[in-house]
Each structure stands twice: as C-alpha cells, then as structure tokens.
C-alpha cells in the first residue's frame, strides 16, 4: 500500500482498474485507493502482469464482516440460552403437572 503523506494511517482498495492476468505498463493506473481524505489512483512503478488481487475488498469491509460475525455469534448464544431456559421451564411445568396428577386423590392403593 503506498503512503501518501505523513498523516496517512490507512488506505482501502476501492476498485481495481485491471483484472488478474492483465498487462500493466509502467506509470499506468491500475488500482484506486481511498485514504482518510481522498481517493487516489495508483500508478504502477514497473511494467508487469497483475497476477493476483491480494486485497479484493478493502480492509474496512473485512473489519465490518468480523464485527458482524461476532455480533451474530453473540445473538446466537443469547438465543440458545433463552431456548435452554424455556426448555427448563417446560420440564418444571411437566414435572409439576405429573406430581399434581399423582396427588389428585385418585390413587388406587
């Protein structure tokens, strides 16, 4: 990732202007990078072939996906805990119902 200025802390790939396998000439723009302040086009320092787009999506998108996954895990754990609590309440209710039917005075002793 090129660094434009001392204040630049991070950048994100916003779009690829070339595809994997494309020839890239020296000085040719092949990717757009967004910083905190502006979107810049990055020119190739050398001639070559774009072999692999190592960063397909920007880092912020990846970070957001991680946050979303963690949030989903938390929601899933909360749902599982709620379901376990409901099952425990059902077990208690069924036991009380069974005990009440045993104590209704209709014993055959």
Image (cartoon, grey):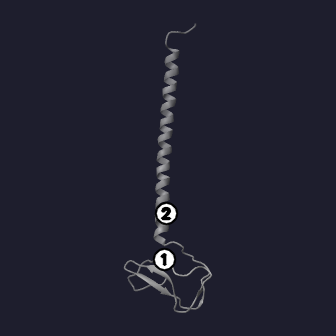
Do residues under tags 2 and 1 come within 8 Å of each other at their CB atoms? no
Q: Is residue 73 above or below residue 57?
A: above
Of the image marks 2 and 1, the number of the one nearer the N terminus: 1
> Please, which residue is most extreme toward the top here?
109
Q: Which mark is residue 79?
A: none
Where is residue 105? Give x, y as percent.
Answer: 50, 9
Q: Is residue 12 above or below residue 105?
A: below
Where is residue 107? Give x, y as percent.
Answer: 55, 9
Which residue corresponds to the image point at 48% horizontal and 85% vertical from the top-left?
42
Q: Secondary structure at mark 1?
A: strand
**Dot 2: few (<14), some (14–19), or many (≥20) neighbours within 10 Å?**
few
25 or 35: which is nearer to us?
Answer: 25
Q: Which mark is residue 65?
A: 2
Which residue corresponds to the image point at 52% horizontal and 89% vertical from the top-left?
28
Q: Is residue 47 above or below residue 76?
A: below
Tally of numbered tags: 2
Q: Give the distance between the C-alpha atoms of the residues marked 2 and 1, in whole angstroms.
A: 16 Å
Which residue corresponds to the image point at 46% horizontal and 56% vertical from the top-left?
71
Compared across the picture, whether 51 is left or right of 8 comes to: right
Task: Report the residue marked by disc 1.
Answer: 13
**Dot 1: few (<14), some (14–19), or many (≥20) neighbours within 10 Å?**
many
Where is residue 77? Give x, y as percent.
Answer: 49, 48
User: Which image quarter holds the C terminus?
Assistant: top right
Where is residue 60? Give x, y as percent.
Answer: 45, 70
Q: Secondary structure at mark 2?
A: helix
């Amino acid at each position: 990732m090129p660094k434009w200025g001392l204040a630049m802390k991070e950048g994100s790939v916003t779009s690829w202007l070339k595809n994997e396998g494309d020839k890239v000439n020296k000085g040719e723009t092949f990717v757009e990078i967004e910083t905190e302040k502006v979107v810049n086009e990055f020119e190739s320092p050398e001639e070559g072939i774009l072999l692999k787009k190592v960063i397909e999506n920007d880092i912020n998108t990846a970070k957001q996906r991680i946050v979303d996954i963690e949030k989903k895990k938390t929601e899933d754990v909360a749902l599982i805990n709620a379901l376990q609590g409901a099952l425990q309440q059902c077990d208690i209710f069924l036991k009380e119902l069974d005990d009440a039917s045993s104590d209704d005075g209709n014993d055959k002793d």
